[in-house]
Image: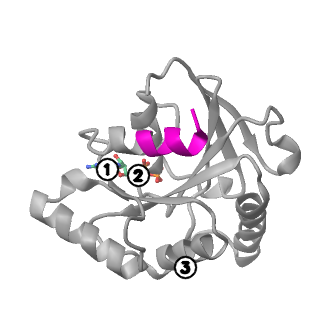
């Protein structure tokens, strides 16, 4: 994928602010600190487009980035913040759930999970929820450079087993440091967005 342009569009706090141009949307979700901002920056070859710091106050915003005037990346706020109140978490859940279940432009959810550790209970419930609603899904194991080659393969298998992924379901082992997995992930994104 040749990146001709990438720009931040809006932090949407509700459906009224979602774009109306009908371009395909690729959502990225994962626990805070999983490496989501780093992955977005690496995919787009930008140093600092997505903010590489967790922002607990911004848990209810969908950050839209427009790529090549052909699609959007939608940065879904990290789930599992310890610091926000229960009511804030519930509001997060409703807004994101509605977006994920109802947004016609949404073509793929990229669920990021730290490859160094087995998926957490939250990762598993997110995966099961997305699968249950038949939302197209690609799992990405992040920070692969922090493991040896053998461990990468082994942890990939553990991730598949723990999530109960069907055979052939996409799992990309990714490193924002080395760029490992970048081409594979772009292929999956381009296919899903039909570009
Ligand atoms: P976010 O909260 O999910 O957006 O996570 P960030 O992208 O801010 O990353 C959290 C921390 O993990 C930062 O210190 C990053 O430098 C580090 N990190 C993210 N991705 C990688 C990676 O692929 N390899 C390594 N070694 N560190 C990473």
- Kindly state the secondary structure of the residue where label 1 is placed: loop
Query: Do tag 1 and tag 2 residues touch (Cβ < 8 Å)?
Result: yes
Residue under pointer 3: 125
Kindly report the distance in space between the C-alpha atoms of the residues bearing marks 1 and 2: 10 Å
- Closer to the eye: label 3 or 2: 3
In the image: residue 85, left or right of residue 144: right
The mark nearer the N terminus, 1 or 3, is: 3
Residue under pointer 2: 35
Magenta region, residue range: 187-195
Q: Which residue is at 80% across, 42% downward? A: 18
Assess mark 3: CB under 8 A from ligand 1? no
The mark nearer the N terminus, 3 or 2, is: 2
Q: Which residue is at 65% across, 43% downward? A: 25
Residue 174 bears which disc, if any? 1
Tell me where residue 195 appears, x and y as whole percent. Answer: 57, 32
Tell me where residue 130 appears, x and y as whole percent. Answer: 60, 69
């Amino acid at each position: 994928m040749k990146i001709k342009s990438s720009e931040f569009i809006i932090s949407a706090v509700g459906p009224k602010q979602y774009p109306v141009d009908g371009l395909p949307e690729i959502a990225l979700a994962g626990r805070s600190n999983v490496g989501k901002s780093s992955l977005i920056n690496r995919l787009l070859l930008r140093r600092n487009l997505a903010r590489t710091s967790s922002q607990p106050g911004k848990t209810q915003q969908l950050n839209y980035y427009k790529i090549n005037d052909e699609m959007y990346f939608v940065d879904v706020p990290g789930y599992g913040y310890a610091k926000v109140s229960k009511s804030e978490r519930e509001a997060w859940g409703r807004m994101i759930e509605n977006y994920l279940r109802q947004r016609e432009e949404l073509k793929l959810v990229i669920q990021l999970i730290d490859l160094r550790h087995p998926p957490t209970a939250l990762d598993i419930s997110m995966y099961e929820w997305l699968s249950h609603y038949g939302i197209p899904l690609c799992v990405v194991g992040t920070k692969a450079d922090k493991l040896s080659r053998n461990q990468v393969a082994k942890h990939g298998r553990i991730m598949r087993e723990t999530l109960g992924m069907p055979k052939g379901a996409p799992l990309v082992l990714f490193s924002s440091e080395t760029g490992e997995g970048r081409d594979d992930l772009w292929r999956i994104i381009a296919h899903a967005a039909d570009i």
